[in-house]
Image (cartoon, grey):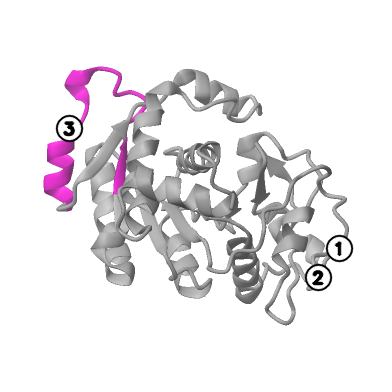
Amino acid sequence: MTTEHVTNGSGVSGTRMPSRHANSAQTVVFTAPSGGLGLTTLASMFALHISQAGRTTALVDLDIHEGGLDVILGIEGESGLRMSEISAPLGHLSGEALCLELPHWEGMPVLAADPWNTAARGDGSMVKAWEIKAAVDAMTQMHDLVVIDAGCAHGCADSIADYGLSNQLHLVMLVEMSVLGMARAKHHLTRLIRQCGQEQVLVVGMHPHLACSQSVRMNDADAKAYLQMPIADAMLPRRALSVSIVQGLGIASIPKEYRTLLATIERDTVGRSAHKLPSHVAETSARNRRFR
């Protein structure tokens, strides 16, 4: 169990711990109106993109009822704490202790939901909201950025309302570029804007697997007109990536076709917040501060 005291680092050996930050990290929350779009994969690739740029990054799975981030990443066999094992009776956790006890992926600590293990808590109950909030707070103390997979519509609303995700928050909503996808997205987008404001929400599209031909794809202009929001970009599924995940091998690397999109998400979320500087200037400044 994770306690409020620093424990040994048996979960991960040889991992350099980031120093405690004076200010909380920025938080980017990924959500979607429905499942099966590749939301967890997109959130994970974004975290990897940011980490490779030199910022300390952590991944948190707040899809409490249906999540399994470690399985998607292919690290389900790694030792370390999962969400069902988090215990914070006083509502506080040590960020350093927590990060040492978590499994890591590509150098990043990963706090994954494991709804199939809730019975291990003894009473069969889900982890409590204040314990989740304590874990998220602990992660933000130790990193430049915390990337959160909030799952589908209802789970995201719970995450924002119950887990204190309001400070330096950015929302990325992944929508299916289809008529049904737009109908689902409209309601979810309205809820997000009502809770957080339109300026904090970025919409990203995902074309259905069957939309391999340009002639059958929904275009960005139609999606924008329906949602009354611009679409940052629309992704096409990549077979090699899908096969790797289905086979349990995780994400070996970021497909080159997605790198421009990830840079756009960075620019329009965390890049906007660093003192209103252009993203490349903000990144350089942050890097210089860390290595003084």
Q: For the residues labelled 2 and 3, say whether their Cβ atoms are less than 8 Å apart.
A: no
Q: Which residue is mark 3?
A: 219
* Cα–Cα span, label 1 and label 2: 8 Å
Q: Tell me which residue sits at (64%, 54%) in the image.
A: 113
The type of residue carrying mark 2 is Thr
Front of the two marks 1 and 3:
1
Mark 1–mark 2 CB contact (< 8 Å): yes
Which residue is more in the foreground, 282 or 191?
282
Residue at disc 1, secondary structure? loop
Q: Residue at x 67, y 40 (%)?
A: 107
In the depicted view, which residue is nearer to us: 58 or 123? Answer: 58
According to the image, label 2 marks what residue? 3
Q: Which numbered disc covers residue 7? A: 1
Marks 1 and 3, Cα distance to the nearest angstrom?
52 Å
Q: Amino acid at mark 1?
A: Thr
Q: Is residue 128 left or right of residue 151?
A: right
> In front: mark 1 or mark 2?
1
- Highlighted magenta segment, given as a residue range: 203-227
Distance Cα–Cα, label 2 vs label 3: 50 Å
Q: Secondary structure at mark 2?
A: loop
**Dot 2 or dot 3, earlier in sequence:** 2
Q: Which of labels 2 and 3 is toward the front?
A: 2
Residue 88 lies in quadrant: bottom right
